[in-house]
Image: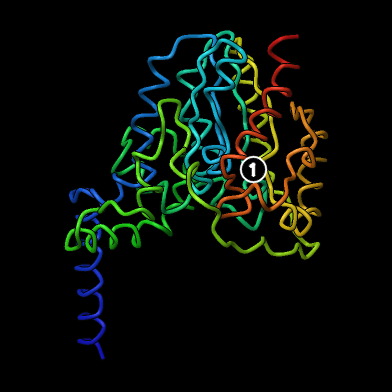
Amino acid sequence: MKKFILKAIAFLVIIGAILLASLFLLPNNVFKNTLMGGLIEKNALLARSGSPKIILIGGSSVSYGTDSRKISEAFHMPVIDMAISADIGLKFMGDDIKPYINKGDVVVVGVENFAFAKDYPEDFEGSETLVGIIFDIDQDGKRYIDFKQWVELSAYIPQYSASKLVNLITPVFKRTESNYLYSRKSFNQYGDSYLHWTMPNEPFTDDEKCTGKEEINPDAFAYLNQFNKYVLSRGATMVIIPPPTENASYQNREFFIKKVEAEFKRNRLPLIAEPSRYRFQRKYFFNMPYHLNKSGVDLRTGLVIQDLSKVILK
């Protein structure tokens, strides 16, 4: 029995050493060529943009649902769409743009409601996607990760390390119609995902119906309050715009949507539109209840311009 235990320990140590070596030493060209690799260009775009400017943050509902060129033309300001995916986490989204916020800027927060749900901590703290970003795309991003967040991310590290080993022996990300939509080349010069604008809608499933037991994640609202104070201290303005949501999914999630809305108001956070304003028919969605097609992008962008005009042109 003792020999078996020693062999098991030795095996685990070897596996752990291999995973650590993979995490720190192996490149991940497959991951770098996905949407997440676009963070490199987005940060570069943000760094060279002057002020005042409009910065958009959020999940894929923002990147797939915005025509930033129209917003830029409406307000005669640079617009940078920093959104990529919700599982990067609200905290990293905010921390990543802090160094670039200056006087006169407008930060538009359009994260999906899952970022505020206790049952979805990965949409606030980040998930395996964020692990990949801070180890293989933006290594300086590690400075934004606090102790509690490292604890949350530690659960994803072995899986990500193993995926790097797999990617080492598989072909590098190849261009096909399906995966090119999710590559780092799918963003235009403003940071919007735009390749799907010319494609037909795809079938998708609705979000599950709320149980009525969903709870707010207090850490998410504590962070958003702190982030708002930081933005104000820089002489900039933060506003919150609800994510676009397909009609049936909105109805299924309405219990929690209303709960989040009430929490925004209780915290006196700058929500500048009712969530129902961004509730759209199914025909406006591409392949998810939050990913708009070109008609939906045009509809939502028009509403965003109207809502921002209350802040920018007042």
**Res 302 quadrant in image:** top right
- The residue sitting at 22% across, 80% down in the picture is 6
Q: Which residue is mark 1?
A: 219
Residue 51, percent from left and from top: 50, 9
Residue 277, percent from left and from top: 78, 38
**Res 183 quadrant in image:** top left
Answer whether residue 148 is visible to the viewer in this image. no
In the displayed structure, 112 sits above or below 189; it is: below
Q: Which corner quadrant holds the N terminus? A: bottom left
224 lies left or right of 191: right
- The residue sitting at 67% across, 46% down in the picture is 113
Which residue occupies the foreground of this view, 220 or 3?
220
- The residue sitting at 50% across, 49% down in the picture is 87
* Residue type, numbered disc 1: Asp
In the displayed structure, 25 sits above or below 73; it is: below
Q: Which corner quadrant holds the C terminus? A: top right
- The residue sitting at 39% across, 26% down in the picture is 43
Q: Secondary structure at mark 1?
A: helix
Crowdedness near tag 1: few (<14), some (14–19) or many (≥20) residues, C-alpha within 10 Å: some
